[in-house]
Image (cartoon, grey):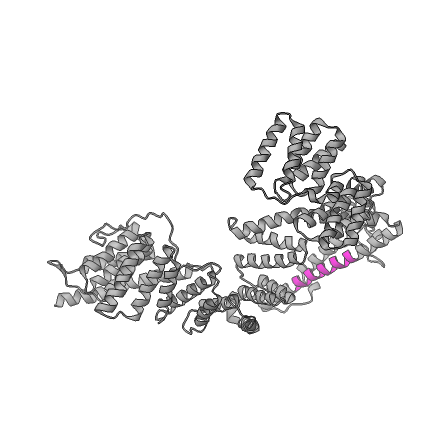
Amino acid sequence: MINRNFHALTTKYNVLFNGQETFNQGIEEINKGYKDDWFERLPIEPIVFEEDKIVMASFNSGPGAGFGGASEEDKKELTTFERAEEKAVKAIQKHGMNIDGTEHNRQIDNAYLLLGKSRYFSQRFIPAIDAFNYVIQNYPQADLIAETKIWRAKANTRNDNEETAIESMKLLLVVRDTLEANLPDEIKEQAHTALAMAYVKSDSMQNAKKHLQLATRTLKNREQGARNLFILGQMYSDENKKDSAFYVFNKLANFKKAPYKYKIHANIELAKNNSKDSLSTTLIERLQKLIKDRDNRPFLDELYYQTAVLHQKNDSIKLAVSNYNNSLRAKNGGDKQKTFTYEKLGDLYFKDSEYQYASAYYDSVLQVSKDSLDIRIRRIKRKHKNLASLIKFEEIVTINDSIVQLATLSKDDQKLYFESYIEKLKKTDEEAAQLRLNQMAFGNAAASLQTGKRGGWYFYNNQSLSFGKSEFKKVWGNRRLEDNWRWTEKAGNGEISTKDAAQVNTVNARYDLETYLNTIPTKTETIDSLKVGRNQALYELGLIYKEQFKNQNLAKTRLERLATLNPKEALILPINWHLYQIYVNLGDAEKSEKHKNVILTEYPDTKFAQIILNPNEITSEEVAINEVENEYKKIYYLYKEGKYEEAVLKINAFVATVPDGNLIPKFELLKAYAIGKYKDKEAYKIALDFVAVSYGNTEEGKKAKEILTLIEK
């Protein structure tokens, strides 16, 4: 009896106590190091195991335990859980009292449980299951047998054997709880949580939800209970069951003992899952109250973002934009949150037809995002790419317009314009230099106060004085102390060398009026070239807005302006054709008739005129995509065999049956190639021009434009 009690007490309060403390330390390290991704469904157990990881055992295997110690060098490299495992093994080795197959030390089952849990967190699931099985087989009446079975089920789930885990947990909850003895609430929570883990692993979400509901009835374990509630709410939200999700998140938000990170995110999820407009104002006030709380500063980016989303739903766009910007400015904001915020701002500007701003925000998403394989990021990348050509053409229009406008001014007006610009530039530079000087003086004063000295006037500070002199020379050069010293002709009047004078002139080039005046083009050819480039950019913008972004009003504005700028002859027909289609879509019969008459009167022999005169020739019969592709292959083989006329006839007959097919541009370009083989150059140009105008944004349309440019040269 003395030996049994000695070994039991020594095991419990010495070796096993130290092992349990080490194990708890490892759990604490996991909790601190694990970062939840609140935008995705949380895992039930907050730990990430490496897939396909193979870990060699640190100890020699025995019947469910490791026996044989590690060298002193190996012990230095042990992880926290390996040290806990070592303590469990030590308890079993030194204090085990297995006499004739019966263990007389009542603490050894606890040592085996600690051994299995330590192996579990070391990602050694099979040895962990061995340790748990040893307890279950040899200590069937132990008070920790239910907990051991739960850990064994979790290890089986991690080991891709979730069916065994589900079966064992059902036996525990049904047989042990109902027939033998009532299980404590803590054990029931653990068992239902383990079952939910197994069902999630087997993609049986309905069963997982059922057991998460059962696991959250009592909430004895506040950490795991809060997590289970949050995951349950996420599952309802994923199924678009907003009311159920709202109920669960509201329960979590009111759970006083829940860890704060779950409560704050539960409030955010309440706003996300609000299905009643009447609650929007209440939720916004609730979020504003959370924003004002200083304890919530780590979550400001998420709180501002969700407030903005609610304002956007209420059509309060200015308030939404303001809160989105506050979310971006929040300190310690997460990169993933920023991608959502930038995307929302980009979508708002895109919807408002502010495509340049939208492109800038989409670009910010791509700069911040680290997950290039994410479907959302790939979608934004395509959107940004589509906006790139639009931004390029808008810049060409803006720059060329500015230069042409300056070139048309008189010399006096040009001087007045740039003199005003230079004055503004100088004022801005002076203010920036003064700000930097003040900041340096403030910094020196602060440093003096920290060292126990009072800061004096900054002109008495050699560092500030040196900085001020260098800034003055950088902006103004070497000037004499005299009246009107800021005039340009005063630069370099001091006694300085030729080399220094050259340097001053270089520095002051941005304030030199002649530098700007000399950049204005004066040759007619140069100005005409700028106008042609601007006109072509306006035409491309009209096509992009019309075909790609379906913004008829912006397309109309660009093309109408182009029509007033005396465009080249080749653009007149396409301009009228596209404006005719735009006004038909907008329901403006008077203006569509005007452009229709231009086409019929001045271009009666074109295909555009034929389409206007005979719109009923196109039938609405749909043809399957594979049939269209097969037909294209047949006609292409005719073209390769030199049967050009037959290819053209077949294209005309077939295209009439598929007016909306994505492959129509390919047929039309192939038809143009065929026409170029057996007809004259003029017919070839007309066919190419039709493809370039009608399908300008497609690869075939761009190819037709390139060929037309080469022919005209």
Q: Nearer the viewer, residue 316 or 616?
A: 616
- Asked whether, in this view, residue 679 is left or right of residue 306, the answer is right
On screen, 463 above or below 395?
Answer: below
State the residue lying farthest toward the top: 642
- Residue 181: % across, % down: 23, 70
Q: Is residue 508 visible?
A: no
- Residue 159: % across, % down: 32, 52
- Asked whether, in this view, residue 107 is left or right of residue 216, the answer is left
- Asked whether, in this view, residue 190 is left or right of residue 674, the answer is left
On screen, 496 above or below 435?
Answer: above
- Residue 280: % across, % down: 56, 71
Rendered residue at 71%/61% (across/down): 434
Q: Main secondary structure of the magenta part?
A: helix
Rendered residue at 63%/69% (across/down): 454
Q: Quadrant of residue 450?
A: bottom right
Quadrant containing the N terminus is bottom left
Quadrant containing the C terminus is top right
Rendered residue at 60%/54% (across/down): 364
Q: Nearer the viewer, residue 28 or 226?
A: 226
Q: Is residue 294 magenta?
A: no
Q: Is residue 62 visible?
A: yes
Q: Is residue 440 magenta?
A: yes
- Residue 672: % across, % down: 69, 33
- Asked whether, in this view, residue 237 is left or right of residue 609, the answer is left
Q: Which residues are magenta?
A: 424-441
Q: Quadrant of residue 323?
A: bottom right
